[in-house]
Amino acid sequence: MRLSQILFSQGFGTRRLCAGLIYNDEVKVGGELVDDPDAQFETDGLVFEVSGKTWPFFDKALILLNKPAGYECSQKPKHHPSVLSLLPGPLRERGVQPIGRLDEDTTGLLLLTDDGALIHKLTSPKHHVPKVYEATCKHPVTPEMVEKLKAGVELREPDDKPGYTEFTKAEGAEAFGTHGIRLTLIEGKYHQVKRMIAAIGNRCESLHRPSFGALQLPETLKSGEWTWVASPAEVSA
């Protein structure tokens, strides 16, 4: 693939801007400056530099973000900044978006991609991709509460759907500490964890997601930081 096309596909702007980066000695491949936009490179395993920053080539981007509180999983946020503002320009330019959503006050592992088929696969309940949530509750968590979550609870109606109720259960539930509960879910209903905890007579005070599928939130990844996921296979490995 031509170098200018590589930069364009990775979100570095219009074709003209990408050619300008190359002409202005802003692009290196293999540590060497390349000043020809038409220079050809194999994209498999390609790593290049733009303005001193290293970028691996990915036909489809898959990003793992340690989401902080106070950010909305939306391209058009209403009350808080978008999680997309935590990502560099090229990733925003190529159109990555969250795979599912975390509430603005929920922290932890959030995946983002520009692969629409992957978004559908990882958010569809029929694919049974587990997500783990750790909630700190207002009141102590009892064994009876845990068993109710495993058996299933009737969720309170959302504010925008008066009279509507639905039944759901956790694929896994366990207490930790005195006020903590860890839930494994395969669905992604509106405010699901908070509504499930409310249904057992408790209240969610804080919520964190440490894992999505087989992916665990890296201990070294600070709040607000992101990293590449090399392949979608890592999610279901």
Image (spheres, rainbow, N blue to C red):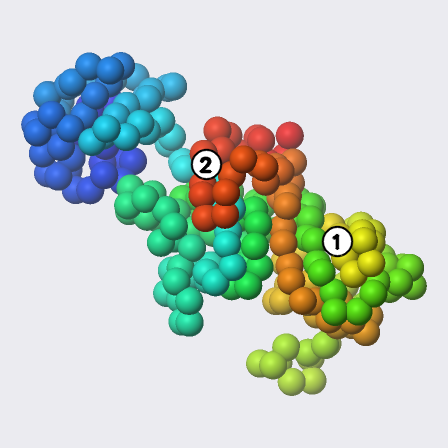
Q: Against 5, is 208 above or below?
A: below
Task: Name which quarter of the figure residue 203 lies in.
Answer: bottom right
User: Along the horizontal axis of the image, is 152 left or right of 68?
Assistant: right
Q: Position of residue 13 (x, y in %)?
A: 20, 42
* SS assignment at label 2: strand
Residue 175 seen in render: yes
Q: Estimate how packed mark 1 is, as few (under 14), some (14 to 19) or many (20 or more) residues with alpha carbons within 10 Å.
A: many
Q: Residue at x 58, y 31 (%)?
A: 234
| x, y percent for residue 227 | 45, 36
Q: Residue under circle 1?
A: 183
Residue 227: assigned label: 2
Q: Is residue 200 left or right of residue 49?
A: right
Residue 92 image offset from top left, x and y in percent:
32, 48
Name the residue located 45 percent from the left edge and 48 percent from the top edge.
Answer: 224
Res. 102 mark: none
Quarter of the figure with the C terminus? top right
Q: Callout 1, which amino acid?
A: Leu
Sequence-earlier tag: 2 or 1: 1
Residue furthest right as drawn: 144
- Asked whether residue 149 is in view, the answer is no
Q: Amino acid at mark 2?
A: Thr
Q: Is residue 160 above or below residue 170?
A: below
Residue 173, given in percent of the width and then of the height, sits at: 81, 53
Q: Nearer the viewer, residue 1 or 57?
A: 57
Position of residue 12 in the picture relative to residue 193 (left or right): left
How far separated are the C-alphas under marks 2 and 1? 25 Å
